[in-house]
Image (cartoon, helix red, strand yellow):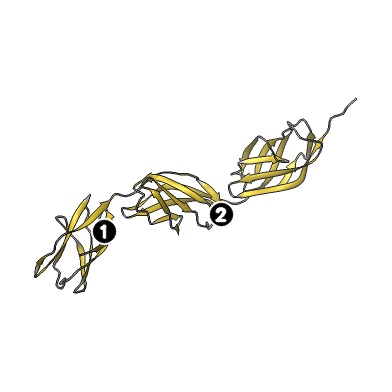
Amino acid sequence: MPISPNQGSTGGGTLVTITGTNLSNTSAVKFGNKSATNITQISPTQVTAVSPSGAGAVGVTVTTPGGTSNPVSFFYVGAPFKSSLGTSSGPLAGGNSITISGTGLSTATSVDFGGVTATPTVNSDSSLSVTVPAGAAAGPVAVSVTTAGGTNNGLTYTYVDSPTIGTINPTSGPTSGGTAVTITGTNLDSTDSVTFDGTPAPFSVINSTTLSAVTPPGTAGSADVAVTNPAGSDTAVGAFTYVAGPGI
């Protein structure tokens, strides 16, 4: 007499289908010593019922006017606990893979990102991988994981738009570097690097439209300025000019 699914939440509420023979006029379904609810006769060979709360492995039995069946195993699974996201932000378009760590993840069937569901790959009871779906708008969304034991949430993932560079001021400075530059644009609050002709520059985020940077040493001539965040990058070609100092 198989039962499907054969596992569910410790809190109960799992709809199971029991298949066997001579199941007509089923009067009771028990999970261990607890009675199931919402028992529905589908056919003489099939009955559905909703599991009560429980823990561990229990035997499920069906009672009809002819007696009580042999037990089949049902396993209660605790709700998952998520401890961390491997990556907490990414592009609005999605498509990047992240790792979720925690416990009770071995039966994970879905991961929800702000109402958009993705199917995970279970690595172990403590780890799963999932491809982030596209977001509706830039900003934080709640992340929840659903397993046979239930749904747990409490983590946040932030969708990020690609940055754009509007203006750079000043637009020139000495080849020795050290020039304080203000960069304005959009989606700059998640910036993780600023480069001048590929050389990283120290920077500080002021707000979503402004950041400051200090030019690294460079060679005389124009230099490309690039701003990068988890969603991508934007390059202002030849936007800053390195000026050689005088020589005698």
Is residue 36 at all visible to an observer of this figure? yes
In this view, the residue farthest toward the right is: 248
Is label 1 in a helix, a strand or a loop? Answer: loop
| Disc 1 to disc 2, C-alpha distance | 38 Å
In this rendering, position of residue 133 left or right of residue 225: left
The amino acid type, in three-letter code, at marker 2 is Leu
Q: Residue at x 13, y 68 (%)?
A: 27
**What residue is shown with label 2?**
92
Q: Please tell me how crowded label 1 is: few (under 14), some (14-19), or many (20+) other residues with Cα within 10 Å.
A: some
Q: Are marks 1 and 2 in contact (CB under 8 Å)?
A: no
Q: Which residue is nearer to you in this view: 236 or 72?
A: 72
* 1 or 2: tag closer to the N-terminus: 1
- Identify which amino acid the numbered label 1 is placed on: Asn
Q: Residue furthest bottom?
A: 43
Q: Is residue 165 visible?
A: no
Q: Residue at x 56, y 56 (%)?
A: 93
- Residue 175 in which image quadrant: top right
With 140 as the anchor, is 171 left or right in this view? right
Above-or-below relation of 153 to 248: below
**Residue bearing mark 1:** 6
Q: Secondary structure at mark 2?
A: loop
Image x and y of residue 10, in percent: 26, 52
Residue 115 horizontal/vertical position (percent): 45, 58
Q: Residue at x 65, y 48 (%)?
A: 233
Q: Quadrant of residue 45?
A: bottom left
